[in-house]
Amino acid sequence: MTKIRHFSIYCGTFPLMLQLAGILVLGVFAQWLAWRIKQPAILPLILIGLGVGPLSTLFTLSGDKLLDGDAIFTGDLLFSFVSLSVGVILFEGGLTLRFKELKSQGGTIRNLLLMGMIGTFTLGALTAHHIMDMGWRMSFLFGALIIVTGPTVVLPILRNVKPNHAINTVLKWEGILIDPFGALVAVLVYEAIKAGQPGDAYTLEMLKDFFITISAGMVSGGLSAFILYYLLKRGLLPSYLRNVFTLGLVILTFSFSELMHKEAGLMATTVMGIALANTKLDELRKILSFKEDLVLILVSVLFILLSSRIDMDEISRLGWPSIALFVVVVFAIRPFCVFVGTIGSGLSFREKLFISWIGPRGIVAAAVASFFSLQLSTALPANSPELAEANMLLPLTFLIIVGTVILQGSTAKIVARGLKVQQQTPKGLLMVGASEMCRALALKLKEEGAYIVLADTSPTHISDAKAMGLHTFEGSVLTDSIFEELDLGNIGKLLACTSNSGINMSVCRWFERELGEANIFRLVNKQELQQKEGNLAACVWTGTRADFVVLTQGIREKGLYVKAIPNNGEYHKLLADEMASCVPLFQLKKDGGVEIIGANTSAWDKGDRLIYALIGAFK
């Protein structure tokens, strides 16, 4: 009995508990590796999943996998977990979509979604039929599986590349919205396969199911968003329960929608996220931060689980025809759908070309392909000619996923630079801190024509800044979500000038990778006040010994001054005349840019101006 029990907890080579722990550990490692190599996390996640899954059978003594998703989560349990997880992922993605982004590109996104679904579905099916010699039913199912692109891959690419606003908006909305629609089309095709040869009656039934699913998802998602908004707005949820309650409501919404109509859950959670994103609730920032951490874990677990399910014999069937299929999907189908879908959009040829290049597949394609592969392998007769084709769906889909991520993720920045579709060098300034001193500085900079955004966690400081007509952001900037919540498209430099030197240093480290070390500055701290002038770090603002208190008092008592500085000699003359009382703060360039004056000052040209303060002698 002991031997039987001991054996039952083993899956393959390692105990079940060790496999469960290994999934999480390997997922975190893959996320770290992706950060180090500056690639979307999906790439190392899938490669690690394949390594501990099918590829591990090549070197284990027993020939078993080190990790097998089918053995850990058996039967419907795996796909219930996958479906719920994808629902949470799409909810988090929906929280980043704001309707104001659609003012200029709404029609383009709509047309691209329609053309992306119709074109990829039909052309993908034709390609699979003629190149892979698949039957029509499996060909159309494959075409449905590759419709989706996926926010888990597209958003990291956009953040790394920083394309212009039009491209960023189109790709972000397409990547999130096409997931529930693509999954729905795949389910309808799958149901058609199970029903046998579809005719006109079934075609009408499919159309009816399509619209019922969308309607059910929109109604349940919208209702859940209203309930959560009402509870948060009325303060009926304690702060420590808001994140957990939101997660529970998302799962309930998904499950209830699925009961209303099959596959309405993904639509419901996406709609719920979008509806909440377009409300003015400060609590959403904390919820989004929590969801990002949760989604990071879910994505890591899902990709390793699903890629570990592939078998070596399925991989071995991939030959040159599958490579040809990949080439057609990437270099022909995607560009065709984009160029047709963006007719009359106002996008330039270069912008359309770049959008054509970015179409990586993500978690929804992997999840749906895994589900159908398992269902069809058990539903089709053993001697059915379609069984071999069904077994090819999963490796073919993963080939498209891995291939597009490697190819497009590694070359996106090079292509964007070559097509000249990246954002222009931003000239705005993000000032972390909205104290009295910061507000005075921001107001002066605004009066001189500079673009300034004040960020602070204090509602009072933000309220006072808004009353002065300043651009603001209320919340912490030390979160991953800040790069989605706060539009950094016009921000090229950062100044951390809170009264807390530890926060200032943390902010500089946090934004260093995003904005570059040369564009990050902070106030001097008390320890540095004891150092000699020449030892101050280059990132210290003012290049002097003025800390928060000294500078605040000086600006309050004597105000701020603006002076035209035509050359370096005039600048040094001003410093010599004013001696210790002059604190140079900002250099206003004649092209509208703002230079933060640190230990190393840039050259002065005719038309440049200096903003400085006069204070008492330093202590």
Image: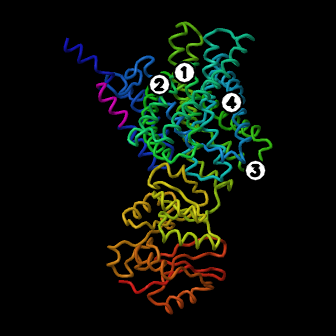
The residue located at (62%, 75%) in the rendering is 589
For disc 3, the marked residue is 348
Q: Could you say which disc has been placed on residue 310 in the image? A: 2
Find disc 4 in the rendering and name its residue.
Answer: 117
Three-letter residue code for mark 2: Ile
Of mark 4 and mark 2, the one earlier in the sequence is: 4
Q: Give the spatial CA distance, label 1 vs label 3.
A: 41 Å
Q: Marks 2 and 3, how far apart in space? A: 41 Å
Say if 378 sits above or below 286 in the image.
Answer: above
- The C terminus: image quadrant: bottom left
In depth, the one of 14 and 297 nearer the eye is 297
Q: Please, what is the three-letter code of the amino acid marked with disc 1?
A: Glu
Residue at image position (19%, 14%) is 2
Instruction: Identify the mark nearer the N-term, 2 or 3.
Output: 2
In the displayed structure image, the side of residue 466 where residue 105 appears, left or right: right
**Horizontal relation, residue 455 to residue 320: left or right:** left
Residue contact at pointers 1 and 4, CB within 8 angstroms: no
